[in-house]
Each structure stands twice: as C-alpha cells, then as structure tokens.
Amino acid sequence: MKKIALLTLALALIGIFSGCFLAKQEIIFTTPAYSYLVPAVDTIDFTTKYETNAYISKIICADEETLNTSGPSLMSSYAKPDTDMVNTVFNLSLDRLDKFDGQLCDLYITAYDTATTEETEAVLRANIGEIPDAVVVEPVETLCEDGTVCVEEEVVADDTTTDEVVEPVVEEEPVTDTEVTE
C-alpha cells in the first residue's frame, strides 16, 4: 500500500513540475503592430501567460541595432497595475524612447520569471512619435495656355501648397443630330 502511495505521489509531483516546465511563457500584445506610439503619452500594452517581470530589452530602428540593453536597464520603464487580480497585464512606459521619434522600430520585449530561469522575448513593430499630418489633395480646373481645361491637383500639407498639372481635359463641342437627306 505504501508503494502505491509513494508511486502516486511521485507521479503527481512529476505532473506538477512537468506542467510548469512544459508550458512556455507567452507574451500577447494588446497594442496593435504598426501603431503610432508617443513616448510621453502611450504605453506598450501586453499580457503574459504567467506572472512575470518584463522590460524593453532591445530596439532596432532602420535595420540597425539602435539600443541593446543586455538586461533590464530599462526596468524603470516597467509598470504593473496595483491590483493582484490582474498580475499578468503590463503597460510599459515609453518615456526613454523619445530619441527615436519619427522612426519605425522593432521593440523587443523580454519577460522573465525570477523563480525559474525562464525568459521569453517577443517583438512589436511600431512607429515612435505622433501620427503625421494627412495630405489633402483637391482637384482644381483651370485654363491651360492653349485654351483647354486642365485639371490640377492642389496638395496641401503642413500649410504649404503645390500645384501640379496632371492631365489636360479637352472640352468638345456637343454633337448634334443632323438630318440626312437622300
């Protein structure tokens, strides 16, 4: 009877520990990819499968490694909600990323557990900075030098106006029916 109890206990412990080691940590971003993130205002929002710590470990902009912290040197940018019930939700501050303003960057997020040595990394591609002003294009009809009507596009962006001739439009005389006499 003791052998069965010990065997059952051993299998239960193996099951518990294998569940801990086989189920990998996972980072799920709630901030959409290619978002415009303003460093002083926005955060990178994500959840993890298990309770963990997280930080921005590396930033690559314009295909070159711009920042590699080689550890949690941006740990002060890490923030977790105060509620214990939501212990796997993260809002990483972007306060230290203002020098990357206007760039499309890959932000590497590393989540690690201090109880185990497990570490997981995920990448979010985002635009750092505010959304650029939209370009407004309005068609305008004017008279060309040869007397035909030209369509120009008036492009308005950042309070500057540029006129560009796109295509000439020729007005034709309306066609009238003529009587055919035999």
Image (tube, rainbow, N blue to C red):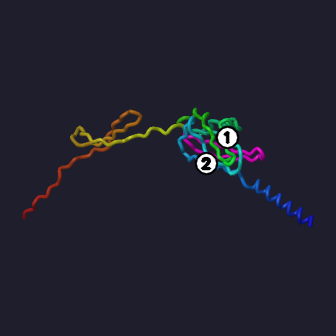
Q: Amino acid at mark 1?
A: Tyr
Question: How packed is label 2: few (under 14 Cα within 10 Å), some, or many (20 or more)?
Answer: some
Q: In the displayed image of the protein, which residue is found farthest to the right?
A: 2
Of label 1 and label 2, which has the lower sequence position? 2
For the N terminus, give its image quadrant: bottom right
> Relative to 82, is 5 on the left or the right?
right
Magenta residues span 104-127
Q: Which residue is mark 2?
A: 29
Work out how far the residue at label 1 is from the one at label 2, CA to CA, in angstroms.
13 Å
> Relative to 75, is 5 on the left or the right?
right
> Relative to 17, is 57 on the left or the right?
left
| Whether residue 101 is situated above or below residue 181 in the rendered picture | above
Q: Which residue is mark 1?
A: 55
Q: Position of residue 49 (x, y in %)?
A: 68, 51
Q: Amino acid at mark 2?
A: Phe
Q: Is residue 96 magenta?
A: no
Q: Is residue 124 magenta?
A: yes
Q: Secondary structure at mark 1?
A: strand
